[in-house]
Amino acid sequence: MFSTRLDRARAAMTESGVDVLLLSVGSDLPYFCGYEAMPLERITMLVVPRDGDATLVIPELEVPRVVERPDVFSIHGWGETDDPIAVIAGLAGSASNAAVGDHMWAGFLVDLTAALSSTGFRRASTITGPIRSVKEVDEIERLRSAGAAVDRIAERLQGGEIELVGRTEAEVSAELSRQILDEGHDRVNFAIVAAGENASSPHHHAGSRVIRTGEGVLCDFGGTMVGTDGVGYCSDITRCVWVGDKPDREFLEAYAVLHEAQAASVRASVVGTPAQDIDRVGREKIAAAGFGSYFVHRTGHGIGVEAHEDPYIVEGNEHQLVAGNAFSIEPGIYVPGRWGMRLEDIVVATVDGPDPLNTVDHHLAVIEP
Ligand code: ZN
Ligand code: ZN
Ligand code: ZN
């Protein structure tokens, strides 16, 4: 699998005139070699020459953590008094063009540009993004498992099994985080809980605000499930609930618009459709209801080994969906200082049409305290 992926990377490098691919911290590294680097001041780098074998340059003390895959890469451990930048520059040889991991520390890039003074640098995502955005069958199944796990949590939330009234957002966020781990994820990526007016901030940080009856609560949560091969896949879901016996009429009406807009964008997620058209379909419905200026972000983002990756479902992205693209559809309506709502599923584009990985109820759940 890793060899196949590196073959794809080398083909893309040939096409775009890149001589060496340099991957450090971030999700490219586990995707291409099954090892995830710690974000340390000691550099780790997978050096992938277009026409040569890959080498993992890694601090000697981290070597025991590496699952050896001699058919994919060899290991070069560097000691405390070695110069790893010189080692990497040596392996990169006389590369005219290098593609370097987007999340590599800027300090290392400064050192590399000095050591490879005649080399041009570009982002590795120009090579890796298009490859990662087309999921293999096994990757889709792993995204589906992660999606099913957060669906079970959302179902408990909607069923009133997660205590809300009288608790702070932070307490509910902590409970969601525990459940994300209990449901088989290896890490929690986020657990946004936003009550009442706080939900008008799309990425509100759950805090000391106590949840009361008679308000909406937005919960957006997800994590990463790491497989035995060292590669992790993400989940990401948003559901809103109303606490109290009778939802506010304005809230209910807006939710009906959001529900329809989200479903329309999911239905539009068909192979061949430009990403921006999927954004437009839902946005037009929200705008037609008079909430256009309250939908302040793109419709969605790709998802895979990283929570946010290609393809982005946004105006201006003309990328035509291909089978295997996996992404979120998450329109929202946010009235500053008053209330907010978002509805989010992960969807895979397939030759048979859109395949939603989150299927838990999409209606506004009303939880009577
Ligand atoms: Zn977000
Ligand atoms: Zn989300
Ligand atoms: Zn999302």
Image (cartoon, grey):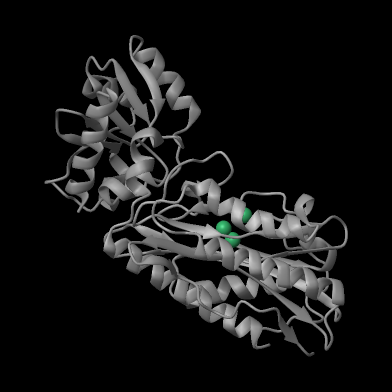
Please give left or right for residue 25 compared with residue 60 in the image.
Answer: right
Q: Where 364 sits versus 49, above or below?
A: below
At 32% from the left edge and 31% from the top edge, which residue is drawn?
22
Quarter of the rendering occupied by the N terminus: bottom left
Residue 336 location (% of width, % of height): 85, 55
Name the spot of residue 98 as percent of width and height, x first. 32, 23
179 left or right of 80?
Answer: right
Residue sitting farthest toward the front: 288
Does 188 appear above or below 249?
above
Residue that appears at 71% across and 56% down:
202
Please indicate whether residue 145 sits to the left or right of residue 280 in the image.
Answer: left
* Residue 115 on image: x %, y %: 35, 14
Name the image quarter holding the C terminus. Answer: bottom right
Q: Quadrant of ligand 2?
A: bottom right
Q: Residue at x 83, y 73 (%)?
A: 210
Q: Name the residue located 36 percent from the left edge and 10 percent from the top edge.
A: 117
Q: Quadrant of residue 53?
A: top left
Task: Kindly tell me whether residue 92 is visible in this rendering.
Answer: yes
Residue 326, given in percent of the width and then of the height, sits at: 42, 57
Q: How many marks?
A: 0
Q: Which of 352 and 111 lies nearest the eye of the viewer? A: 352
Q: Residue furthest top?
A: 118
Q: Nearer the viewer, residue 178 or 82?
A: 178
Q: Of 254 and 6, which appears nearest the observer?
A: 254
Mark yes or no: residue 189 visible.
no
Q: Is residue 318 left or right of residue 128?
A: right
